[in-house]
């Protein structure tokens, strides 16, 4: 028997109908919010936008369900309340719905509608209007339910409630299990330039010898004319190779081109020279093009520089091949205008020449257990100029905070004192004479080596790189494993790329990603933020007040060149005016602080996307910078502590916070460490910085640009072992000794490496043992090397000159085939 105060069946059905209305509202809110997240994904394609929305489904669903039902219940309770109370309830319900539509306060900051996000205030006003409209619809629905008992009973019935609840319940798994977007992943099957045993020459005729080297049709960043490792095949040459059975279906990448050195062989009357390039597969022609070599000044005047571009075999997509097919490459002069002897000197051929295979792999999402990875390499940064490493000036407040929440390695050393060898080690985990990228004439990363980016990409990482140093570029094959690689032909400061770096994070935040940033702010030409220059107390010397700003940024380069040419007979203190020295020291510190400022923006972007807790951040440098520590300036010329000791910070999930690591490590250990943290493995050795096993603290480094007792261009080898430091000088041209051949320092007592112990008889046993260890280390590297490395062409040579690694007075052997 019902109590008189119990609601009637009609009233009970009406109340249950409001539950159905609330469920329908929650479903609509979930869909609207998912749409807003998808539409707000910056620059993303449709699949990635849906992937981004799917990754947020559970917090959106919880938010929408709780607040949607609450708003529905609130409107239900005030149907018969006074007018002002109904208005207040309506406003509060609108606020609840606006909270869901805008994402506040449960969504990650980057997904909340507010200034500075992709879901900005314009969207917020639209969302507010939608929220008010939804509340008005709730009020209207209430009126309909009160006026139509049949409708109330229908919506409040068990079947209707189960149906509405079922739709809401299946929404998260339906949206969250959509197939992930895919990404292209390249596998290099064979680097043919490094496999001379696979090439055969035409047996039926004499022909000029082929070789490998670098070809550069034209130094012009606006066209596809830059350096390429190449098979140099003078006219009249013909070579063949076959696709091996185990290689299966592959794509040949090759491009025909003529080096810019042919300009010197053109007739004085301007008559063009034409070179014919042919490619056959099993005797059938698949590529036959003539390249006209004309004077560059004529082409430039006529706006036809594109005529110098590489001609891609098979087009931009390459040439599809299969196992067992034989490929023939041939060059010739259709109308011989040169003698046979001159023709054999023509640097023409096919750039690239490697086999690859592509597949598509699904992108993945990050988590604390499967973190993103951001690797920042700050070019030319001394560890002792960072405040977290004890520097008295506060140069790196943002990186100090990174160090405080992670590990700081006190004794980390680069594998070289200049960019190419050290960066190759950072990305491969190999030592200099393993990867072979050690000099201008050996500067292209062998495609057969596995890189950190390749390991991570196969683990589902979206990979991207932004390089401000023109030496770290796709032309040198540093792009292996990167889906995107942003580089330029000239040095760029971080202010020129920071917007793209932040946009890259915005676009790829929904995925598990690996971002490599190679920044150069401490490198010349210095261009620090004005506020940082003032903060470091820089006073511009009076003699430089009328000098253009770009030349002021190269003040250190000016004195570095003078000191290097003067040799060791003149010390820095005797040549460099005191006010100049004070200025470029402050200029360097301000540049370090500028780099730190931009690193802070990157860290802020991760925080804004809620990714700090699921992102490993690694920070290091490729080398340091000498500031008259041993009488010289800049880098590359020696292996002293100021040039090879680098910062190394590691922070993120699973990394102990506030820990200082005192053991000696190399920056090459970063690649295997990050590969392990990403769930992969790089290389055969267990070289993770986080390994708990015993650690060999022997560190090797080298430079091929050494300056030693007045001589330049020497090979310098270095070894740190058991508290001692050994330097050895070798003349590259003949391998003979340089006197004195060795220097020995005791690092514990002489941290700045000023006192040479090598001449002292008491240290002869230590010197002998370290020489033996150095030789064994070097021989081991050479034995493990699996491929060759080619040198620079015209474009890279211009970049080297712009950076200061090649002076106008230096001989260059970059054109010599290797």
Image (cartoon, rainbow, N blue to C red):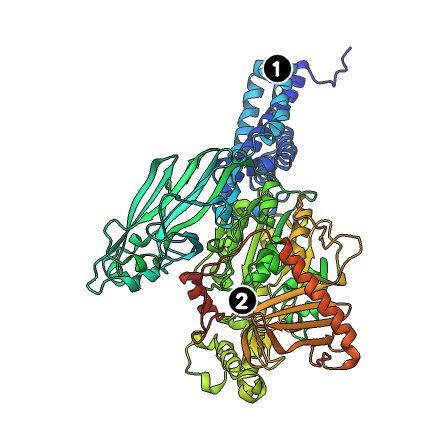
> Residue 153, which numbered label?
1
Residue at far top of view: 1
Separation (CA) of disc 2 from disc 1: 71 Å
Q: Are marks 2 and 1 in contact (CB under 8 Å)?
A: no
Residue at far left of view: 269
Who is closer to the viewer here, 712 or 741? 741
Q: Is residue 725 above or below residue 473?
A: below
Q: Residue at x 34, y 37 (%)?
A: 286
Q: Is residue 406 above or below residue 143?
A: below
Q: Position of residue 306 (x, y in %)?
A: 30, 53
Can I make out residue 785 in this image? yes
Can I make out residue 49 in this image? no
Q: Residue at x 36, y 49 (%)?
A: 206
Earlier-in-chain disc, 2 versus 1 = 1
Name the secondary structure under disc 1: helix
Who is closer to the viewer here, 629 or 732? 732
Who is closer to the viewer here, 112 or 446? 446
> Residue 579, which numbered label?
none
How many numbered discs? 2
Name the secondary structure under disc 2: loop
Who is closer to the viewer here, 440 or 546? 440
Residue at far bottom of view: 574
Q: Position of residue 633 (x, y in %)?
A: 56, 77
Horizontal arrangement in the rendering, residue 145 relative to residue 770 (left or right): left
Q: Is residue 764 above or below residue 470?
A: below
The quadrant where residue 155 appears? top right
Q: Residue at x 77, y 57 (%)?
A: 695
Q: Position of residue 149 (x, y in %)?
A: 59, 15
Q: Is residue 572 above or below residue 689?
A: below
For disc 2, the marked residue is: 521
The quadrant where residue 429 appears? bottom right
């Amino acid at each position: 028997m019902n109590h008189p105060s119990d609601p009637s069946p009609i009233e009970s059905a009406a109340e249950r109908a409001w539950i159905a209305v609330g469920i329908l509202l929650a479903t609509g809110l979930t869909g609207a919010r998912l749409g807003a997240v998808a539409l707000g994904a910056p620059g993303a394609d449709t699949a990635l936008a849906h992937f981004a929305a799917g990754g947020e489904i559970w917090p959106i669903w919880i938010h929408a369900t709780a607040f949607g039902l609450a708003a529905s219940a609130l409107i239900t309770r005030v149907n018969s309340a006074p007018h002002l109370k109904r208005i207040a309830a309506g406003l509060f319900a609108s606020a609840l719905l606006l909270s869901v539509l805008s994402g506040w306060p449960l969504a990650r900051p980057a997904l909340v509608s507010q200034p500075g996000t992709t879901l900005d205030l314009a969207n917020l006003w639209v969302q507010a209007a939608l929220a008010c409209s939804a509340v008005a619809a709730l009020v209207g629905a209430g009126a309909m339910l009160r006026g139509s008992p049949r409708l109330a009973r229908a919506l409040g019935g068990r079947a209707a409630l189960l149906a509405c609840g079922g739709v809401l319940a299946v929404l998260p798994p339906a949206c969250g299990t959509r197939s992930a977007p895919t990404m292209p992943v390249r596998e290099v099957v064979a680097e043919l330039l490094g496999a001379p045993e696979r090439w055969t020459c035409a047996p039926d005729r004499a022909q000029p010898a082929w070789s490998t080297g670098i070809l550069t049709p034209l130094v012009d960043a606006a066209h596809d004319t830059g350096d390429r490792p190449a098979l140099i095949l003078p006219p009249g040459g013909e070579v063949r190779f076959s696709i091996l059975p185990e290689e299966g279906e592959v794509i040949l990448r090759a491009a025909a081109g003529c080096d810019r050195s042919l300009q010197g062989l053109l007739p004085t009357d301007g008559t063009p020279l034409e070179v014919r390039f042919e490619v056959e597969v099993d005797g059938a022609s698949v590529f036959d093009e003539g390249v006209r070599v004309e004077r560059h000044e004529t082409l430039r005047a006529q706006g036809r520089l594109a005529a110098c571009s590489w001609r891609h075999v098979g087009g931009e997509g390459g040439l599809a091949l299969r196992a067992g097919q034989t490929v023939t490459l041939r060059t010739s002069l259709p109308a011989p205008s040169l003698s046979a002897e001159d023709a054999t000197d023509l640097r023409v051929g096919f750039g690239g020449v490697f086999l690859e295979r592509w597949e598509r792999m699904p992108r993945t999402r990050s988590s604390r257990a499967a973190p993103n990875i951001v690797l920042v390499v700050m070019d030319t940064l001394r560890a002792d100029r960072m405040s977290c490493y004890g520097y008295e000036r506060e140069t790196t407040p943002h990186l100090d905070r990174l160090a405080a929440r992670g590990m700081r390695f006190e004794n980390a050393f680069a594998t070289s004192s200049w960019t190419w060898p050290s960066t190759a080690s950072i990305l491969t985990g190999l030592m200099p004479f393993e990867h072979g990228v050690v000099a201008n004439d050996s500067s292209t990363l062998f495609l057969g080596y596995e890189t950190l980016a390749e390991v991570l990409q196969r683990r589902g990482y979206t990979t991207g790189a932004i390089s401000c140093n023109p030496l770290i570029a796709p032309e040198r094959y540093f792009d292996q494993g990167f889906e995107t690689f942003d580089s330029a032909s000239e040095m760029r400061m971080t202010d020129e790329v920071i917007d793209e770096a932040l946009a890259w994070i915005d676009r790829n935040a929904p995925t598990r990603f690996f971002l490599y940033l190679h920044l150069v702010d401490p490198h010349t030409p210095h261009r620090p933020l004005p506020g940082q220059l003032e903060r470091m107390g820089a006073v511009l010397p009076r003699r430089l007040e009328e000098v253009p700003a770009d030349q002021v940024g190269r003040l250190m380069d000016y004195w570095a060149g003078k000191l290097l040419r003067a040799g060791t007979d003149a010390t820095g203190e005797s040549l460099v005016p005191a006010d100049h020295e004070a200025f470029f020291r402050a200029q360097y510190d301000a540049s370090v602080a500028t780099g730190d400022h931009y690193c802070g923006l990157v860290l802020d972007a991760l925080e804004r996307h809620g990714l700090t807790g699921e992102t490993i951040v690694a920070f290091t440098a490729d080398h340091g910078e000498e500031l008259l520590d041993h009488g010289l300036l800049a880098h590359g010329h020696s292996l002293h502590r100021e040039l090879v000791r680098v910062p190394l910070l590691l922070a993120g999930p699973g990394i102990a916070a506030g820990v200082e690591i005192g053991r000696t490590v190399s920056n090459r250990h970063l690649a295997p460490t990050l590969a392990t943290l990403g769930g992969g493995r790089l290389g055969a050795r267990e070289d993770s910085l986080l390994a708990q096993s015993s650690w060999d603290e022997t560190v090797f480094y080298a430079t091929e640009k050494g300056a030693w007792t007045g001589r330049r261009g020497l090979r310098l080898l270095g070894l740190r072992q058991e508290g001692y430091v050994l330097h050895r000088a070798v003349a590259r041209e003949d391998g003979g000794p340089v006197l004195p051949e060795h220097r020995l320092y005791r690092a514990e007592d002489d941290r700045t490496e000023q006192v040479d112990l090598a001449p002292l008889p008491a240290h002869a046993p230590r010197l002998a043992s370290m020489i033996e260890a150095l030789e064994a280390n070097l021989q081991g590297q050479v034995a493990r090397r699996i491929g060759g490395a080619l040198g620079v062409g015209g474009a890279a040579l211009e970049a080297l000159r712009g950076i200061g690694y090649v002076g106008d007075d230096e001989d260059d052997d970059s054109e010599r085939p290797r």
